[in-house]
Image: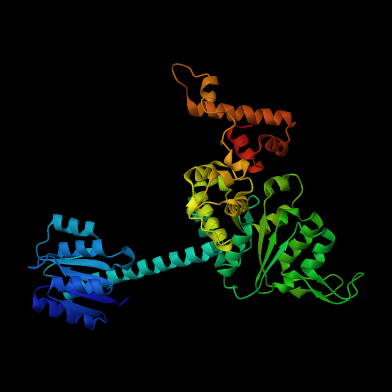
Amino acid sequence: MHRGSILLVDDEEKILKALGRALRDAGHRVVDTPSPREAQRLLAERPFDLLVVDNVMPELGGLELIREYVNSTPEGERGQVLMMTAHATVESAIEAMKLGALDYLQKPFEIDELLVVVRRALDHQRLRTEHRYLLSERDEQFDHYGIIGRSRAVEEVIRRAELVAETKSTVLITGETGTGKELVARAIHDRSAQRDMPLIKVNCAAIPETLLESELFGYVKGSFTGANENRQGLFQAAHGGTLFMDEIGNMSLTMQVKLYRVLQEGKVRPIGSTEETDVDVRIIAATNKDFEKEIAEGHFREDLYYRLSVIPIQLPPLRERREDIPLLARHFLDRFRTSMNKTIEGISPEAVRRLEAYDWPGNVRELENTMERAVALEASGEISLGVLPDRVAGYSGASIPIGVAAATTSFPPEGLDFEKEIANAERRYIQAALEKSDGVRTKAADLLKITYRSFRHYAKKHDL
């Protein structure tokens, strides 16, 4: 049972002493007073986990005391509230609940009944406090890694990252370039049980295929020209920790076979060695490719994909979470004005509107670079439209000017079935793309500029 600090207020001295004694015997820290005015002073001076207050008192009623307590105390510093009353009515109970009381007790009541209700209230307060702490800790830690946003999409990414951090399962992070895949990988590692072990990063697209095997698995002296000493591979260097393999979609089929074997068996064999070494490594892989399309075209092994995507995390592009753009822009403004020692207080409303309207093909990375440029060029106390790149400042968000679409679209007087029209348009475009690509779905998806997964969805939806 959670034991806490309780402020007990009742103008009847005998009841006050009896209840105070029972609560203290149960292990609680109790301050009791017959005066609601004294209770006001105590509540202003220090926090309590629970306020237990009588409803009818001569100086100040319980409802008034509760109302004053709620209005004057921030929610994060407020304890739970229980009201006692010998004059229970529906109106008083409802009013107490509206003011924030968790429960109420009708006099006369048994001491055991009081202890049960108090225990429930204190448990509720403990859970609320722990939840508030975890939220603040999460915001602090994830904001620290640059995962900034309050949109539903970002909340889902953070929730999934928190859950996967508690396991050692392989993670596949997918998303467009610049969405923050490495930030998520680091956040997962630093919140995991392996946080004190190494986090090793390798960009599979930046290392030639001939060197990637030796980088990952290591080699022994004399195994090839230039191998003048034994060298540990990245798998061995990351033993006990995490290996982040970025741009894994660029790995050759030959290397994919070797990587699959390591993931399957948990062993690596350095180049030129006849002995295998056990490795305990958590793999976090990342790619900006559409793996379903890559598998369909024979560029990526399906068995390796399933090994990597035990827990998938899809990062949304910035254009799908536009509500986060002002928050991110402000974050980058604060960072760069500090590093550049500039006194820029904010971003003009027009500049914010253009930032929100732009599609950001480079995602958060492009926004970061844009804000760095803006801070460097801005001479006033506010980021203006003039310091934004032309592609952002002049972006309208639509290829057809406003009003033209309405003038050129046929609209029958009797109205139309909007959902049916949209469905017919989808079917026409899917059918046309299939015909133009000779039935090759991956090419049809490219023609429509959608992912292979989306194309499959529409094709199935329209039975094509």
Q: Is residue 293 left or right of residue 158?
A: right
Residue closest to the eye, 88 or 78: 78
- For the C terminus, the image quarter is top right
- Quarter assignment of residue 283: bottom right
- Quarter assignment of residue 75: bottom left
- Quarter assignment of residue 286: bottom right
| Rendered location of residue 442, percent (x, y) | 71, 39
Residue closest to the eye, 404 or 99: 404
Q: Does residue 284 appear in this view? A: yes
Q: Is residue 88 above or below residue 196?
A: above
Q: Is residue 328 above or below residue 15?
A: above
Q: Does residue 102 appear in this view? A: no
Q: Is residue 440 left or right of residue 63?
A: right
Q: Residue furthest top?
A: 413
The residue lying at 19 percent from left, 60 percent from top is 96
| Rendered location of residue 462, percent (x, y) | 59, 32
| Rendered location of residue 380, percent (x, y) | 52, 51
- For the N terminus, the image quarter is bottom left
The residue lying at 60 percent from left, 36 percent from top is 458
| Rendered location of residue 218, percent (x, y) | 80, 71
The residue lying at 44 percent from left, 64 percent from top is 135
Q: Residue furthest left?
A: 58
Q: Residue furthest right?
A: 225
- Identify the colour scheme used: rainbow
Residue closest to the eye, 242 or 39: 39
